[in-house]
Image (cartoon, rainbow, N blue to C red):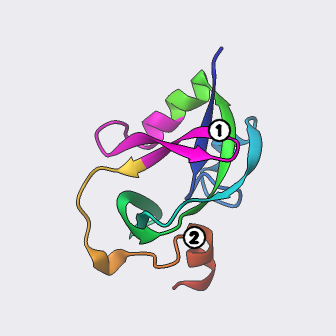
Amino acid sequence: MNKHLVFVYGTLRRGGSNHYMLENSDFVGSHETEPRYTMFRLGQFPAVVARGETSIFGEIYRIEDEVFSLLDELECFPHVFSRQILTTPTGDAWMYVYNRLVGTEFSVAHGDWLKFLESGE
């Protein structure tokens, strides 16, 4: 079985509503991306687009093929989210990026979904 690194920034993070999907995966560490993205609020979950000037806060996990397939299903890959490689200090990790257009009125300025949920800003 293959192992993959994945960077998660929303509901899959510890404390997020979908974190249970990663409970049996190896937590590698926290990570903050380069300021090249924009995070948007899409109702109860975030989406990140690969353009902008915001760092995204998240976590890196080492996952098996089966978990990767479940994450692809959750993220509606490749129709709603696509994947791109993110270079991190622990190796290249997959990151789900939104492949549809969104309005700037829903942006999460600081790039931290859990902080946004706690503060509402």
Rendered-image quadrant of the N terminus: top right
56 or 63: nearer the eye?
Answer: 56
Q: Quadrant of residue 21?
A: top right
Q: Locate residue 117: give its quadrant.
A: bottom right
> Which residue in the protein does label 1 denote?
91
The magenta stretch spans residue 77: yes
What stretch of residues is rendered in magenta?
A: 71-96
Name the residue at 59% across, 23% down. Answer: 66
Please give the residue where the numbered disc 2 appears in the rendered image. 112
User: Rounded to the nearest whole Å, what is the CA distance between mark 2 and mark 1?
Assistant: 21 Å
Tell me which numbered mark, 2 or 1, is placed earlier along the sequence.
Answer: 1
Q: Nearer the viewer, residue 78 or 5?
A: 5
Residue type highlighted by circle 2? Asp
* Residue sitting farthest toward the top: 1
Marks 2 and 1: CB-CB under 8 Å?
A: no
Q: Amino acid at mark 1?
A: Gly
Q: Is residue 68 above or below residue 112?
A: above
Compared to 55, does 62 lie above or below? above
Residue 42 visible in the picture:
no
Where is residue 59 drawn, in percent x and y?
A: 66, 53
Residue 77 placement (x, y as % from top left) = 37, 37
Q: Secondary structure at mark 1?
A: strand
Residue at (45, 46) in percent of width and height:
96
The location of residue 30, given as percent across then percent down, is 71, 56
Q: Residues within 10 Å of mark 1 (few under 14, many from 20)?
A: few
x, y percent for residue 55: 52, 67
Q: How many marks?
A: 2
Query: Quick check: 55 left or right of 27?
Result: left
- The residue that appears at 42% across and 40% down in the rendered structure is 83
Tell me if residue 58 is in the magenta stretch. Answer: no
Q: Is residue 93 visible?
A: yes
